């Protein structure tokens, strides 16, 4: 089912004259059959929307605004014609029809991350931060990804580890190291994060990780770099936390 759904997002090759065009509608027609009557939302609509412009979509109730947004997002297809996208379309999350009804919220989020080529764990962490009204910044997610990319290139020579960390083997949440509760757990997760060995259901910098890092005034990406510098030497990590901690 998901494979067919994802196929909606594979765009055709773009014409050469779309260099300055953001979205092109080519003869787009869409109608819905209700009670023996066909309601036309679009009929042979053809228009070029330029790049670098803010464009508003206005219309009365039932005019087809949400249907057009769903077609642009790739959720539904026009009956005739084509829609060409020169770039990336942000998912219209304000419209509930944008979510697949057979998936949970977390599954929808992970599916959309794969559609856009985004790391699913990092997006999940970002969404969890936002939902908890913490400090959601895309910069944090990008910085974490940057550290991991550097480690993968410089230390792993571009090849992720072949051992996936079993969540059941993680240190307990109450475990301590040099008096720091949670430190053993986040060390294990950070090392696995760097190596690309985290289980898909285990996320670095979520929940207790964030609480620990905030408590000791350490940024998630900085902690990853400290783990990188320390290697397998826990004493160096302890020293780093002590030097940075304000707790």
Image: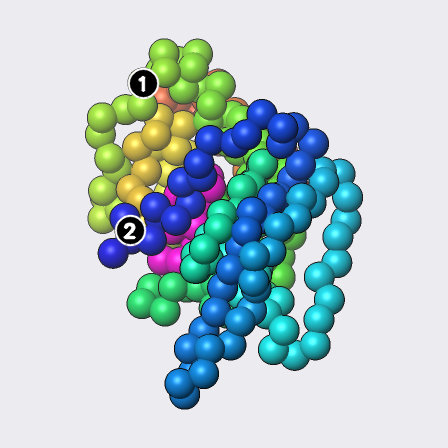
Say whether residue 9 is magenta: no
In the image: residue 51, left or right of residue 43: right
Say whether residue 116 is magenta: yes
Q: Quadrant of residue 67?
A: bottom right
In the depicted structure, whether residue 29 falls above or below residue 182: below
Q: Residue at x 36, y 69 (%)?
A: 101
- Which quadrant: the N terminus? bottom left
In front: 219, or 64?
64
Q: In the rendering, at what x and y percent does residue 100 appear?
A: 38, 64
Please tell me how crowded label 2 is: few (under 14), some (14-19), or many (20+) other residues with Cα within 10 Å.
Answer: few
Secondary element at image label 1: loop
Residue on which disc 2 sits: 4
Q: Residue at x 49, y 64 (%)?
A: 30
In the image: residue 20, left or right of residue 212: right
Instruction: Tell me which secondary structure the magenta stretch mostly adopts.
Output: helix
Residue extending furthest bottom? 35
Q: In the rendering, at what x and y percent does residue 176 appear?
A: 40, 45
In the depicted structure, whether residue 215 falls above or below residue 58: above
In front: 115, or 230?
115
Region of the chain picked out in magenta, as a range: 107-120
Q: Quadrant of residue 12?
A: top left
Upstream in sequence: badge 1 or badge 2: 2
Residue on which disc 1 sits: 159
Q: In the rendering, at what x and y percent does residue 153 appear?
A: 43, 15
């Amino acid at each position: 089912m998901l494979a067919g759904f994802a196929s909606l997002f594979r765009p055709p090759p773009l014409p050469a004259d779309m260099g300055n065009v953001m979205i092109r509608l080519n003869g787009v027609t869409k109608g819905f059959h209700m009670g023996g009557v066909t309601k036309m939302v679009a009929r042979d609509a053809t228009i070029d929307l330029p790049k670098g412009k803010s464009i508003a979509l206005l219309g009365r109730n039932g005019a087809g605004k949400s249907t057009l947004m769903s077609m642009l997002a790739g959720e539904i297809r026009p009956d005739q014609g084509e829609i060409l996208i020169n770039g990336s379309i942000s998912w219209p999350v304000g419209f509930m029809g944008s979510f697949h009804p057979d998936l949970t919220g977390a599954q929808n989020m992970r599916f959309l991350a794969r559609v856009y080529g985004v790391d699913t764990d990092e997006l999940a962490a970002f969404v969890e931060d936002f939902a908890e009204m913490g400090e959601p910044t895309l910069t944090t997610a990008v910085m974490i990804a940057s550290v991991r990319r550097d480690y993968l290139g410089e230390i792993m020579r571009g090849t992720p580890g072949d051992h996936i960390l079993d969540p059941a083997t993680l240190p307990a949440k109450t475990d301590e190291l040099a008096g720091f509760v949670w430190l053993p757990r986040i060390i294990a997760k950070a090392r696995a994060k760097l190596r690309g060995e985290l289980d898909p259901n285990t996320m670095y910098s979520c929940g207790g990780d964030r609480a620990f890092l905030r408590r000791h005034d350490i940024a998630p990406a900085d902690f990853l770099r400290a783990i990188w510098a320390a290697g397998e030497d826990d004493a160096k990590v302890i020293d780093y936390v002590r030097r940075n901690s304000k707790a």
